[in-house]
Amino acid sequence: MEKGLYGVCSYIGNKLGISSERIRLYFIYTSCLTLGSPILFYLVVAFWMNIRSYIRERRSSVWDL
């Protein structure tokens, strides 16, 4: 369950070299200040990560028969 909920924060943290806890705090604080607009960004990134994993899973190699 943690990977599903916090996968976006850890993905962004790994890409930017920032701890995922700081990313989570950023989302919480900015969501409170801007009335939830970062939640839309979070959902878009979560959707994109899900699609990417699905595409990688379905892609077959030339060597797989």
Image (cartoon, rainbow, N blue to C red):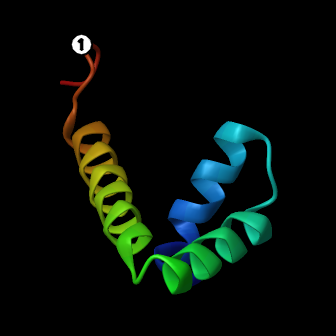
Tell me the kind of residue under disc 1: Val
Residue at screen point 51% across, 62% down: 8
Q: Is residue 51 visible?
A: yes
Pick the residue in front: 64 or 9: 9
Look at mark 1 in the image and give the residue it sits on.
62
Look at the picture and state if 19 lies above or below 48.
Answer: below
Residue 2 in percent (x, y) is at 58, 82
Residue at screen point 65% across, 38% down: 15
Residue 29 in percent (x, y) is at 64, 79
Q: Quadrant of the C terminus?
A: top left
Residue 51 in percent (x, y) is at 24, 50
Pick the residue in front: 9 or 58: 9
The answer to whether 43 appears left or right of 9 in the picture is left
- Crowdedness near tag 1: few (<14), some (14–19) or many (≥20) residues, C-alpha within 10 Å: few
Residue 7 picture quarter: bottom right
Residue at the limit of the structure toward the top, as seen here: 62
Look at the picture and state if 47 lies above or below 24.
Answer: above
Pick the residue in front: 60 or 32: 32
Residue 25 picture quarter: bottom right
